[in-house]
Amino acid sequence: MMKELPLAKVYQFIEPGPVTLLTTQAQGAKPNVMTMSWHMMLEFEPPLIGCVVAQGNYSFAALHKTRECVIAVPPASLSKVVSGIGNCTGGDTDKFACFDLTPLPASHVAAPLIGEAIVNLECVVKDTKMVRTYNLFILECVKAWENPKLKDAPMLHHHGYGNFSVDGERIHVKSKMR
Ligand SMILES: Cc1cc2nc3c(=O)[nH]c(=O)nc-3n(C[C@H](O)[C@H](O)[C@H](O)COP(=O)(O)O)c2cc1C
């Protein structure tokens, strides 16, 4: 069960740069998912997220055409699944079935949430001006969900070629920055 996450809190999950999973739903096709670590926050609220989806990826056409997706943040315990999803294509693989992920209906987009994720961010494409030059989509998060059971679950950070680090200790330092 997912619990609604206030949009103002979305950046807290993206700012540390976790490896994410991006789901899409092309018309008449099975839902697909790809691994994505090239992303950045652009605005607090509404949350704007820039992300690079390479043109050669099966996900590119679905995202470009439907202008919708879900960004899911997986727990570090799913590292093998995350790597596996990023090393095969929805062009010939039903990744939700193959990697035993639970697709859950989203409320604003056709792409599914991922039941095993820490958070799920329903996004619409806000701006495609930089897609042609950089494969860079600007997304607006319109609805966000958190999984209370995975509240403090560590996330993965990508260092290339199958190397990841896992979140360590979290600390709090006095700050005016939200
Ligand atoms: C850790 C990791 C991070 C990745 N990050 C990105 C990314 O930010 N953008 C991208 O286009 N591909 C990225 N990839 C590659 C895609 O996930 C990969 O090409 C995938 O097969 C695309 O799936 P699709 O063809 O079903 O869309 C990443 C792969 C891994 C393993």
Image (spheres, helix red, strand yellow):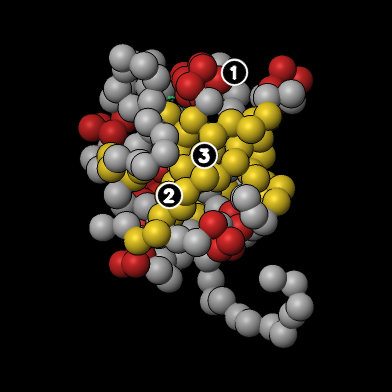
| Mark 2 residue crowding within 10 angstroms, few (<14) / some (14–19) / many (20+) | many
Of residue 125 and residue 91, the one placed in the foreground of this image is 125
In the picture of the structure, the residue carrying the numbered disc 2 is 120
Q: Amino acid at mark 2?
A: Asn
Q: Name the residue located 66 percent from the left edge and 39 percent from the top edge.
A: 50
**Disc nearest the viewer among 1 and 3:** 3
**Disc nearest the viewer among 1 and 2:** 2
* Label 3, label 2: how far apart the Cα atoms are: 9 Å
Quadrant of the rendering where the N terminus is positioned = bottom left
In the picture of the structure, the residue carrying the numbered disc 1 is 55
Please tell me the numbered disc located at residue 83: none
Does residue 135 appear to the left or right of 105 in the view shown?
Answer: right
* Label 1, label 3: how far apart the Cα atoms are: 19 Å
Q: Amino acid at mark 1?
A: Gln
In the picture of the structure, the residue carrying the numbered disc 3 is 123
Q: Amino acid at mark 3?
A: Cys
* Label 1, label 2: how far apart the Cα atoms are: 23 Å
| Mark 1 residue crowding within 10 angstroms, few (<14) / some (14–19) / many (20+) | some
- Residue 14: horizontal and vertical position, in percent? 59, 54
State whether residue 48 is above or below residue 149: above
- Sequence-first tag of 1 and 2: 1
Q: Name the residue located 54 percent from the left edge and 76 percent from the top edge.
A: 169
Furthest toward the bottom, the residue is 174
| Mark 3 residue crowding within 10 angstroms, few (<14) / some (14–19) / many (20+) | many
- Residue 5: horizontal and vertical position, in percent? 45, 61
